[in-house]
Image: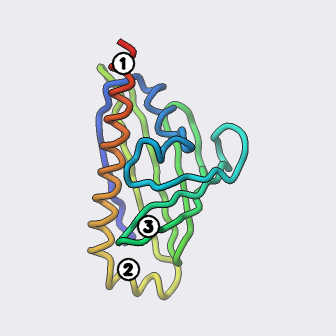
């Protein structure tokens, strides 16, 4: 599954608010229905080097991944990476201010690095791509709804 998957959504909120909410990792389990729990592994504010564990249910089983911020440029961009099960995962988030809110682009890639991961990506690639696509779309939908509800309550 080494192809990139890209998702776009427009959120009716200022770019600073959207970036802040997306990068507020400790509270993502409260907003994103697919995340069971988040454990911060580093102290202090989020930035390059911040590490955390995220637990989700995938294919009926709990899956926990350790992730790290490798780029952090508020309020416009950040990248989170993980290495697990012989693959390198990269999630890149871009935030662009537009007339009535923020355009969010998420680009996700999973690159197999081991022989076994390469074999499994050929066998399971289409099913994994579909599952990951659904998961990331739901994540973006959940974040959009939470951010827009918060903006509405301010008015």
Labelled disc at residue 110: 3
Image marks 2 and 1: residues in contact by CB distance under 8 Å: no
Labelled disc at residue 153: 1
Image: 107 above or below 26: below
Q: Which of marks 3 and 1 is in front?
A: 1
Q: Nearer the viewer, mark 2 or mark 1?
A: 1
Return the x and y of residue 127 as percentages of the image width and height: 28, 74
| Residue depicted at x 46% and y 43% | 30
Mark before the other along the chain sequence, 2 or 1: 2
Quadrant holding the N terminus: bottom left
Q: Count every numbered label the image shows and give the total.
A: 3
| Residue depicted at x 52% and y 54% | 37
Labelled disc at residue 121: 2
Residue neighbourhood size for the residue with mark 3, other residues' Cα within 10 Å, grouped as few (<14), some (14–19), many (≥20) = many
Image: 56 above or below 49: below
Secondary structure category for the residue under label 2? helix
Return the x and y of residue 103 as percentages of the image width and height: 34, 33
| Residue depicted at x 43% and y 40% | 94
Per the model, the C-alpha gap separating discs 3 and 1 is: 38 Å
Lateral position of residue 95 relative to residue 145, left or right? right
Secondary structure category for the residue under label 3? strand
Residue neighbourhood size for the residue with mark 1, other residues' Cα within 10 Å, grouped as few (<14), some (14–19), many (≥20) = few
Image marks 2 and 3: residues in contact by CB distance under 8 Å: yes
Quadrant holding the C terminus: top left
User: Which image quadrant is residue 31 in?
Assistant: top left
Lateral position of residue 129 relative to residue 86, left or right? left
Return the x and y of residue 9 as percentages of the image width and height: 29, 39
Q: Which of 55 and 109 is in front in this view?
A: 55
């Amino acid at each position: 599954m080494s192809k990139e998957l890209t998702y776009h959504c427009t959120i009716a909120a200022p770019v600073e608010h959207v970036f802040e909410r997306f990068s507020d990792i400790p509270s993502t389990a409260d907003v994103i229905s697919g995340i069971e729990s988040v454990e911060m592994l580093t102290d202090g504010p989020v930035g390059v080097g911040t590490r955390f564990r995220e637990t989700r249910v995938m294919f009926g089983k709990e899956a926990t991944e350790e992730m790290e911020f490798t780029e952090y440029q508020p309020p416009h961009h950040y990248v989170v990476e993980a290495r697990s099960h012989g693959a390198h995962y990269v999630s890149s988030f871009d935030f662009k201010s537009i007339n009535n809110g923020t355009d969010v682009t998420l680009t996700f890639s999973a690159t197999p690095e081991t022989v076994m991961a390469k074999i499994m990506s050929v066998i399971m690639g289409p099913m994994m791509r579909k599952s990951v696509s659904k998961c990331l779309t739901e994540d973006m939908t959940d974040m959009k709804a939470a951010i827009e509800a918060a903006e509405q309550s301010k008015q």
